[in-house]
Amino acid sequence: METKNESSDVPRAEEMKNQANEAFKGHKYSHAIELYTQAIELNSNNAVYWANRAFAHSKLEEYGSAIQDASKAIEVDSKYSKGYYRRGAAYLAMGKFKDALKDFQQVKRLSPNDPDATRKLKECEKAVMKLKFEEAISVPVSERCSVAESIDFHTIGSKPRSSFMPTKTALAAVVAAVMVVAVRGFATTEILMVLVSVVLGTFWWGSFSEVEPQYSGARIEGEEVTLDFVKNMMEDFKNQKTLHKRYAYQIVLQTRQILLALPSLVDITVPNGKHFTVCGDVHGQFYDLLNIFELNGLPSEENPYLFNGDFVDRGSFSVEIILTLFAFKCMCPSSIYLARGNHESKSMNKIYGFEGEVRSKLSEKFVDLFAEVFCYLPLAHVINGKVFVVHGGLFSVDGVKLSDIRAIDRFCEPPEEGLMCEMLWSDPQPLPGRGPSKRGVGLSFGGDVTKKFLADNNLDLLVRSHEVKDEGYEVEHDGKLITVFSAPNYCDQMGNKGAFIRFEAPDMKPNIVTFSAVPHPDVKPMAYASNFLRMFN
């Protein structure tokens, strides 16, 4: 028999749900989750509350929590199709296509005449079929060849150099060779060898392709990426012009060589009286990156930056972002440091837009090239021996030392568990200890875990990114942990500020600067994302 209090809880729960729905419509997803939680506490037997909270979690990319809530909705009402729908969408976002397919098949069974359910089931089936095909034709990791080593950017262009210049050069070289022979008196065979070598060498140089004369964009003269080139390239990108593939290849290949020589944990020294800037996720928001440089200056030896992962995906100007950051790395390696985020991976790029954008703006070969080069990005940085910077967070076990991080073999796609996975995916939590990840990957860690890791490694502060924050940053764990996020109004809908942190040596106290989003061309976020993911956004 229902008691009076239980009876009164039902309308109060409905009121909380309605308030949560309004918060959701206003893109206040964290507040919506709080209100849905209150509704659930008043009436946990309503599947709608669980499914709605799952949807709010998905908006915050907390897909692990979304799956838990959607599963609870199904437990409460096994006939509630929206529960399967929300769980399937969360599985899709995590790249778990086979799990998603099972849920959408159930949605179709429960709602056979729903055209939306039919359409999404078909897209999910396509994704699973594509995955099976890719698995069938995939080459074992041990047998894969480097894409980068198969590319010579010098030969990229519309046509070989004109025959006039090589011939003229070759004739001049032959005359010079004859003069050398006359002076030094080589034998006949040696003369022929000199002449042949000179002629072949000059024709080899002449065979290098020229960039089309009608190409009016930024050009790299020779082998060196200069500040003038980078400025011209950024201006072209600002005006939605593309960079010639030859120069794009050159930038990515030269960056690869620089990254390849770095350890998995990079030590950075900031001299006394100098400063250093740390930025968080920029997620393909190129025009907001330009604003960061407007506010804080371009990267240089005197104005160095660390970009802490998640350069790409979500935003639809990821190619412009990555080529700009890589170009600064080529221009002056000590002007900019780059760390790997969880979105510098094949699985994320395939879903969240970077792969599609690269294919559209550059070529299929660049998809494989970026995937390879992302594997060379370092996993963490230590600034002046005191500030530890990592994209995600800390570990499922105590006692991890900086030497353990240096020893990680990072030249691979991120694994689903272990130190590397946790560095890219984990998040802080307000409670002490450790808990399951709200994302479904990595873990959540408390202030006690943060403090122990810092003490064990003689560090003062942990800086991480990975999470959108309303003010662009958040200080947690008694001031020992700062989250910094540099993509304002994330995905054109979150309304958050962006932030970056400036450290001044020698005290290395963080000075946090916040900023708002700036206008960008009318290209929506996720414009290049997978079809099925766009359907849910």
Image (cartoon, rainbow, N blue to C red):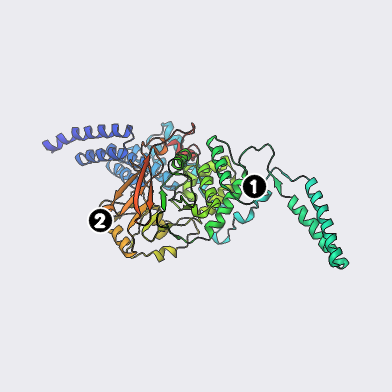
Q: Secondary structure at mark 1?
A: loop
**Crowd rating for badge 2 (residues with CA inside 10 Å; few <14, some 14–19, many 20+):** some
Pick the residue in front: 526 or 187. Answer: 187
Q: Name the image quarter holding the N terminus.
A: top left
- Find residue 492 and report its horizontal and vertical position in percent: 41, 35
Q: Name the image quarter holding the C terminus.
A: top left
Q: Earlier in the sequence, mark 2 or mark 1?
A: 1
Q: Nearer the viewer, mark 2 or mark 1?
A: 1
- 447 relative to 505 in the view: left or right: left
Q: What residue is drawn where x is 82% and y is 53%? A: 172
- 186 relative to 356 in the view: left or right: right
As shown in the figure, which amino acid type bears the numbered disc 2? Pro
Tag 1 residue: 221
Looking at this rendering, what residue extends furthest in the front direction? 273
Using the image, determine if residue 427 lies above or below residue 42. below
Q: Quadrant of residue 6?
A: top left
Q: Secondary structure at mark 2?
A: loop
**Crowd rating for badge 1 (residues with CA inside 10 Å; few <14, some 14–19, many 20+):** few
Pick the residue in front: 346 or 470. Answer: 470
Disc 2 from disc 1: Cα separation? 56 Å
Looking at this rendering, what residue extends furthest in the left direction? 4
As shown in the figure, which amino acid type bears the numbered disc 1? Glu
- Find residue 32 and report its horizontal and vertical position in percent: 28, 37
Tag 2 residue: 432
